[in-house]
Each structure stands twice: as C-alpha cells, then as structure tokens.
Image (tube, rainbow, N blue to C red):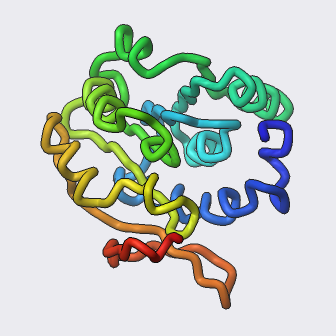
Amino acid sequence: MASKWWDINGISKFLHLMNPVRTKYIARASRGIFEKKILDVGCGAGILSESLYYEGGIVTGLDISSKMIHEARMHAKVKNINIKYLHEDISDHVENYVQYYDVIVCMEVLEHTHNPMEIIRMCSRLIKPAEYLFRLIPMNTHSFSQFITPSELLNYLDHTNCIAQDVVGIKYNLCKKNFYLSSNVLFLPNYYD
C-alpha cells in the first residue's frame, strides 16, 4: 500500500479528500499550529503530517511500519520538506519525549490496535499540559466491530490527564463528493455493515 499512498485517485483517495477538513479543524481547534511541536501517531506515508507542516507546524511522524516511514521520508525528500519521520513504537517514543508536544494527532490508528487505551495513555504522557490531542475518524470507512465510539474514547480520556473540549465527526456527502465536520457523532451498529 505504501507505494500507492500518494496517488490521489488511488486506494487512499478518501484520505486525500478528507485531509483538508482534518487539517483545518486541527489548526482551528489548536488555535493555530504555527511553530507548534506536533506528533502524528500512526502517520503512515505522511499525508496529514505534510499538511500540518505546510500550516507551519514542527512535525514528527511516528509509525510502526517501516515501509510507510520509508514512503513518508521519500516523499518529504522529493518535496524538500523537513519532517522528522520515526519508525518507532509509541511506548519507546514516550521514554524521551514526556510532555514535549503541543499537538498530537492520532488518526486511523486506535481502531487497529489491540489496546487503544494504552495508545491514549501514551499520548497523554507525550502532550504538554493544557495542549491538544486529536482523533477523528471518517464514517463508513471501517467495520463497526473495529470502531471505537465517542463514548469509549471519552472513557479512555477519563483515565488520563486529558480533558475533551470538543467532540466532532467527519462525514462524507456522496452528492457533493466531499467531507465535512459534523457535531452528530451518534452511530447505529449496522450503519457500517
């Protein structure tokens, strides 16, 4: 998948389509990201990382897939941009970066891990006090059995030093072929099946 990651009409088309909405929301909710240290947990090939960089963020991308990190590094090199991409597990990363980041994004990751609470706990150790941690997930892109509901995520946050300040979802409009933010985060079990 890594070699096709940057094809805007390929298998990652929807990530490219939703990326401007995610970037805009993160920048707005963080009260700007210029010169802020940002960690992109599960950065993949760096689609969101690069957008945050172009908004002025000092970005570190973290992923456990060496292939994805290689793709991210190669794309950054071609674009001549300075993003620090690390092939590293978050539990190793936290050892050297406690309360280091101003903004942490964790997109498309938690629903693919065996212990999402542990990822949230690690993120809460990496974030500076009173800063911003984000997780957005597009509707209709995962099976319901993988999905972590907003209430489950809020429960995870209750076990950390983080406080939820905003809960939004991302929806796709089939007619307009675009993504948008929605305050409606209610889900029905067979909505995804």
Residue at the image position 85 percent from the left and 38 percent from the top: 3
Is residue 17 depicted above or below 82 in this figure? Answer: below
Residue at the image position 62 percent from the left and 23 percent from the top: 85
Is residue 158 depicted above or below 146 in this figure? Answer: above
Seen in the image, is 38 located left or right of residue 44? Answer: left
Identity of the residue furthest to the top in this view? 96
Is residue 19 depicted above or below 33 in this figure? Answer: below
Residue at the image position 29 percent from the left and 63 percent from the top: 167
- Find residue 126 and report its image quarter: top left
| Residue closer to the observer: 34 or 134 | 134
Q: Position of residue 121 (x, y in %)?
A: 26, 30
- Find residue 82 and report its image quarter: top right
| Residue closer to the observer: 90 or 20 | 90
Seen in the image, is 70 located left or right of residue 50? Answer: right
Quadrant assignment for the N terminus: top right
Identity of the residue furthest to the bottom in this view? 175
- Find residue 140 and report its image quarter: bottom right
Residue at the image position 58 percent from the left and 73 percent from the top: 179
Seen in the image, is 125 located left or right of residue 14? Answer: left
Seen in the image, is 25 located left or right of residue 173? Answer: left
Q: Position of residue 90 (x, y in %)?
A: 43, 22
Q: Position of residue 103 (x, y in %)?
A: 38, 39
Is residue 164 depicted above or below 110 in this figure? Answer: below
Q: Position of residue 50 (x, y in %)?
A: 65, 42
Marker count (numbered):
0
